[in-house]
Image (cartoon, rainbow, N blue to C red):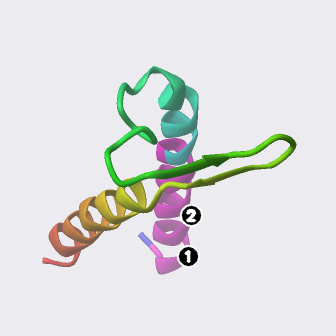
Amino acid sequence: MSSFAKIFIILGSIFLLIGLILFFFDKIPYFGKLPGDILIKKKNFTLYFPITTMILLSIILSIIMWFIRK
């Protein structure tokens, strides 16, 4: 198989995975509501900074990438 075809297969798999994650994102409990996620609500202003969720997501993606490269 040529390298160009492998790239398309990998990109397609990545897009499929992202699509599934976005589809089931609302159904994942606690994702985006972990302790350490910052939520500030004012009268006409809302700031949501999911720092703990992003750190956890970064660790999970790093582990997945480590397994793929191995």
Q: Nearer the viewer, residue 44 or 26?
A: 44
Query: Residue 44: x percent and y percent?
Result: 87, 43
Q: What residue is drawn where x is 21% and y is 78%?
A: 69
Q: What residue is drawn where x is 51% and y is 71%?
A: 7
Query: Residue 21: x percent and y percent?
Result: 48, 38
Q: Nearer the viewer, residue 38 or 55?
A: 38
Residue at the front extreme, as displayed: 43
Query: Residue 40: x percent and y percent?
Result: 62, 50
**Does the magenta portion include 25?**
no
Q: Which quadrant is home to the C terminus?
A: bottom left
From what the image shows, is residue 53 above or below residue 23?
below
Density class for disc 1 (Cα within 10 Å; few <14, some 14-19, many ≥20) is few
Q: Which quadrant is home to the N terminus?
A: bottom left
Density class for disc 2 (Cα within 10 Å; few <14, some 14-19, many ≥20) is few
Residue denoted by label 2: 8
Name the side, left or right, on which 49 lies relative to 17.
right
Q: What residue is drawn where x is 53% and y is 47%?
A: 18
Q: Which element type, helix, strand or loop, lies under badge 1?
A: helix
How far apart marks 2 and 1 lie (CA) works out to 7 Å
Q: Quadrant of residue 55?
A: bottom left
Q: What residue is drawn where x is 35% and y is 58%?
A: 52
Determine contact: label 2, label 1, CB under 8 Å.
yes
The range drawn in magenta is 2-17
Which residue type carries mark 2? Phe
Which residue type carries mark 1? Phe
Q: Main secondary structure of the magenta part?
A: helix
**Does the magenta portion include 15?**
yes
Q: Which mark is residue 53?
A: none
Residue denoted by label 1: 4
Q: Which element type, helix, strand or loop, lies under badge 2?
A: helix
